[in-house]
Amino acid sequence: MDLKAYFRDHRGHGVLSTSNDKGEVGIAMFAKPHVMDDGTVAFIMQHKQTHANLQTNPHAAYLFIEAVPEGGKKWAGKRLYLRKVHEEKDTERLYAMRRHSRDPGDKQRYLVFFEVLKTLPLSGTTDT
């Protein structure tokens, strides 16, 4: 599946789920991922629970729910199963990729890259 085209062509809402090394789960709303040329996906985040969890457990799941037009399918979207491969802190690339031009202020930000282990539709179990 061409994730770059998919996320370019679909609007919706995303949720990123992580857990720490004790299995304590965190869930947070996230924008669509940045899909890189090498197939990894990246999210920009601050050092909050999601980022802290990824320091001890590299696995995450991203749920994307499409904004479905009236009369369309009731539910559509993707589930991405992810593994963190690396991150960058406050890099030029991070700020160039930001979709919003808000002043970064004094908050540190991280660009976290993930390998996509598996992609599934929002419901059902067929690989896409």
Image: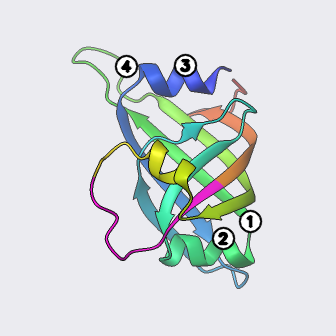
Vertical placement of 69 versus 86: above or below? above
Q: Residues within 10 Å of mark 3 (few under 14, many from 20)?
A: few
* Residue beneath the point at 65% across and 58% down: 60
The furthest residue to the bottom: 22
Q: Residue 6 location, x and y as percent? A: 53, 22
Residue 77 part of the magenta segment: no
Q: Which residue is mark 4?
A: 73
Q: Position of residue 51 (x, y in %)?
A: 57, 71
- Kind of element beneath mark 1: loop
Q: Confirm whether residue 122 shows in the render.
A: no
Q: Is residue 25 left or right of residue 115?
A: left
Q: Kindly tell me whether residue 24 is visible in this rendering.
A: yes
Give the residue pinned by disc 1: 58
Instruction: Give the mark, 3 or 4, whose residue is nearer the N terminus.
Output: 3
Q: Secondary structure at mark 2?
A: helix
* Picture quarter with the C terminus: top right
Distance CA(mark 2)–CA(mark 4): 34 Å
Q: Amino acid at mark 2?
A: Leu
Q: What residue is at 65 percent from the left and 35 percent from the top?
A: 36
What range is drawn magenta here? 102-112
**Callout count:** 4
In the rendered view of the protein, which quadrant contains the N terminus? top right
Type of amino acid at the residue the image marks with label 3: Ala
Q: Cα distance, mark 3 to mark 1?
A: 26 Å
Q: Residue at horizontal 60%, vertical 66%? A: 18
Given the image, on which type of amino acid does mark 4 rest? Answer: Lys
**Disc 3/disc 2 C-alpha distance (Å):** 27 Å
Lower position in the chain sequence, tag 1 or tag 4: 1
The circle drawn on residue 125 is none
Tell me the tag on residue 5: 3
Q: Is residue 91 above or below residue 74?
A: below
Q: Which mark is residue 54?
A: 2
